[in-house]
Image (cartoon, helix red, strand yellow):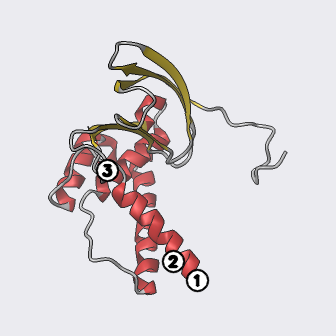
Amino acid sequence: MKTISNAIILVLCFTACICRAQQFASVEAAQAAAIKKYPDLSKADSAFNKAFLEKVAERKARLEVVKKSGRASSYIDTNWPMDLAFRVNANLTANAKEALFVLRGSDDSDPKAAKDAMQITITNYGDVRTVLAQLKITYLDGTTKLKTVEFGPGYKEMYRYYAQDKDFRDVEILSANFKLQNTATEPNGQK
């Protein structure tokens, strides 16, 4: 049971700590922003609204398990409505680029990093489909490199200014497509 509780806590931490462009002051502010960004969220019979309510129910169930385990945190995540809306959009969108979330900013995760060390993180916000993306990495010396990355559900790729083989300036998503599922594969993953 302890292993299951630890796994659930890791999932909750991943959900709470996933890169965000904005921190909301309240759950209500995050809800309003999510509805503004995704108007179908406010339409009761829409696929988006139904999928969102399923994610809310999953979240409540995970929180209940953590609460019963006695390992609940006092941390209040005010961004959860926007996070769930991003995930639902990533799962429903026909545009694979919309499933990818790009965050540019300083690298606060490594205490050895310089205070101005830049980091770019690209995350597949979806939890269903894999995205194949063609990335263009531009280095400070002006050279570029094309790289194809397979972003599985929830996969995150980080580029840190000080940790690459060459100092980079930018990472751009040139194209993205959803990976086609192998139709010859059984639901349990076996052929």
The Cα–Cα distance between marks 2 and 3, rounded to whole angstroms, is 32 Å
Query: As displayed, is residue 164 above or below residue 169?
Result: below
Please state if 32 lies on the left or on the right of 52 as rendered. left
Picture residue at 31% right of the left edge, 41% below the top? 38
Q: Which mark is residue 86?
A: none
Q: Which numbered disc, 2 or 3, marks the residue that appears first in the sequence?
A: 2
Q: Quadrant of residue 137?
A: top left
- Does residue 104 appear left or right of residue 179 in this picture? left
- Residue carrying label 3: 112
Q: Which quadrant is the C terminus positioned in?
A: top right
CB contact under 8 Å: marks 2 and 1: yes
Q: Disc number at residue 1?
A: 1
Q: Residues within 10 Å of mark 3 (few under 14, many from 20)?
A: few
Q: Which residue is mark 2?
A: 5
Q: Residue at x 32, y 19 (%)?
A: 140
Q: Give the number of marks.
A: 3
Q: Residue furthest top?
A: 142
Q: Quick one: SS at disc 2? A: helix
